[in-house]
Image (spheres, coloured by chain):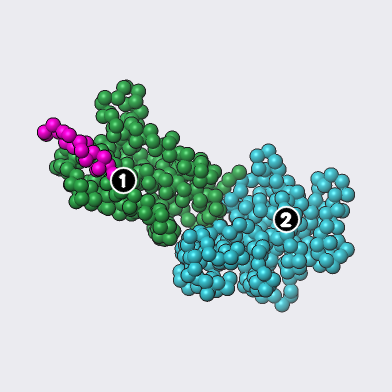
Chain colours: A cyan, B green
Amino acid sequence: MTHPEAPLAEVRRQAIPAVAASSLTVKLGRRTVLAGLNFSIPAGRITGLLGPSGSGKTTLMRTIVGAQRIAGGTVEVLGLPAGSATLRRQVGYVTQSPSVYPDLTVEANVRYFGAMHRKGKADVAEAVAAVGLEALARRKTADLSGGQVNRVSLACALVAHPRLLVLDEPTVGLDPVLRADLWERFRAMARAGTTLLVSSHVMEEASRCDTLLLLREGRLLAQLTPDELSRRGHSSNLEQAFLAIIRNADHAGTGDEPEAVASSRPEGTVH
Amino acid sequence: MDILMMLATTRRVLSQLRHDHRSIALILVVPALLFTAVYFLYENEVLPPGVPRTFDRVGLMMLAIFPFVVMFLVTSITMLRERTSGTLERLLTTPVHKADLLFGYGVAFSLMAALQSLVATAVAYWIFGLDIAGAPGYVVLIAVINAVLGVALGLFCSAFARTEFQAVQFMPVVVVPQILLCGLFVARDRMNDVLEAISNVLPLTYSVDALQEVAAHTEATSRLWQDAAAMAGISLGVLVLAALTLRRRTA
C-alpha cells in the first residue's frame, strides 16, 4: 500500500515497476531454466529473490541485467527492454563470486569500474567507505579475506549510483555484524529511491525485504511479502514457511502453473 | 569509443602488470638474455670476407619475433582471466564500449612492447654491435606493430580457450608455424610453393620482410611501408574479430 502522505515523487516512482517480466522463458542449451515467469518488481523497494540453489536465481538476474539471451517472453527494466544500451548506465550488477581484479588495490578496482560510469575520486571514496573498507583501500585485493573481497565487488557497483542494483547473494561469507550493516545500507538506498533485487538462500534475510519472489525449478512459486509468506506457510520461521509452500506446490500436482497468488497479482501491489 | 574509458583500461592493465614482477621480467629482461645467447651461439662462426654475420640476420629477426610471442602469451592469459573471473561479463553490463576495452589493452601492451624493443635493440646495437644499414628507430617501430599483432591474436584466441592451459596450447598452433615460415630458417624464395603461399598470408612474414628492408637500406623504402601497412591492417582485422568474440549477451 502506498501511504496517503507519501510525496508525489514517491507515487510516481511506484507507477512504473522497475522490472516487469511477462512469460519470460530462458533456455540453456535444451534445458529450460526459467519457464514463463510473470512478475513485476516495484521501484524503490527491496525485492528478495529466494529459492534453493539451481532454481534459476542467477539466470534470472543475468536476464535482468541483459547478460542472458531470452528464449521467449519479455523483460522490461526501468521501462526499456532488458539489455538496452541506456540501461547500462542505470543498472548495477554484483555477481555471486566477486568479479574484481585480485592484483589491483581495493581503490584501483573501484576507480576502474567507476571510470566506466564517469565517476571520480569522491564517488570512489564514498563507495569504499560504504562497504567499510577505508582502512584497506590501498591493499591489494588478493590479500583480503573472502568477505572483504565480496565487499570490494559491491563497492564496484555502488560507485555508479545505479537506479536498479542487482545483487547475487551479497552477504555470503559475511559475519552477522557486517551483514546487518549491509542490510541497513540497502534499506537506506531503497529509501533514497534505488530499487534493489537481492538473491539469497538464507531465509532469515527474507524478513528484511519488502517483497519476495519465490523461485523453484525455474518457476515462480509465489510473489508475496514476508508476512504473507509466514501466514501462508503457517510458520513465523520463514525457512519453515518456505518449505511448507514448496511441499504444497509439490503436492498440488505437476507444478506446471505457479500458484494463484503469483499469477493473479503480478503487479507487486503487496505493500 | 570513449577515450577516457580506453585510458582507464590501459591504466588498469598496466597497474595489474606492475604488480606482476615475473611478467615484467619476461617482457623486459628475457629478450635481452636470449639475444645474448644467440650472440654467443654464433661467436666462433668463420665467414669468408664480405659475407654478413649470421648473428646480424638472425638477431634482427629475433627483435621482431620477441614482442610478437611475448605479447601473444601475456595477452591471451590476461584476457582469459578476464573472461573466466567474471570481470568481463561485469564490464559488459556497464556503458564501456568493446573498442575501449580492446584498444585499452592494445595501448597498454604496445607501451610495454616499445619498452621491450628499446631494451632489446639497445643491447643489440651497443653491446653486440648489430650491423644493419637502416636506423634503429625503424626496428623499434616494426617491433611495436608486431606487438600489437600479438595482442590482437592473443585477445582473439582467448575466446577459444576455457582454461589457462588451453590458452597456452595456442602457442604451437598460432605462433610456431609463423616463426618456422617467416624466413628465419629458410629464405622464403627457397621454400616450395605450398609453404611459400602459406608464408605469404602469415602476418609475421611481413615484419621479417620489413626488417630485412631496414637491414639492407639506409633510408625507409616503400616496401618497408607496404609491409608495415600490411601488418597494421592484419592487426586491425584481428582486433575486429576479437571484438566479435566479446558478447554482452550469452546463451
- Residue A40 is one of the magenta-drawn residues: no
Q: Is residue A14 visible?
A: no
Where is residue A234, by image quadrant?
A: bottom right
Chain of the residue under label 1: B
Count of numbered marks: 2
| Residue at disc 2, secondary structure | strand
Q: Nearer the viewer, residue B213 or B36?
A: B36
The dot on residue A39 is 2
Vertical comparison of A164 with B136: above or below = below
Secondary structure at badge 1 equals helix
Q: Is residue B42 magenta?
A: yes
Residue at far left of view:
B49
Across and down, in percent, residue A187 comes to 67, 72
Name the image quarter holding the C terminus of chain A. bottom right
The answer for how far apart the CA atoms under marks 1 and 2 are is 63 Å
Q: Residue at x 68, y 56 (%)?
A: A20
Residue occupying the point 65% across, 39% down: A29
From what the image shows, is residue B196 above or below residue B12? above
Is residue A69 toward the left or the right of residue B189 in the image? right
Q: For mark 1, what is the residue?
A: B34
Query: Which residues fall within the magenta stretch?
Result: B37-54
Outermost front residue? B44
Would you call the spot at circle 1 few (<14 residues within 10 Å), some (14-19), or many (20 or more)? some
Contact between labelled residues 2 and 1, with CB atoms less than 8 Å apart: no
* Left or right, residue B126 beside residue A117: left
* Mark 2 surroundings within 10 Å by alpha-carbon count, few (fewer than 14), some (14 through 19), many (20 or more): many
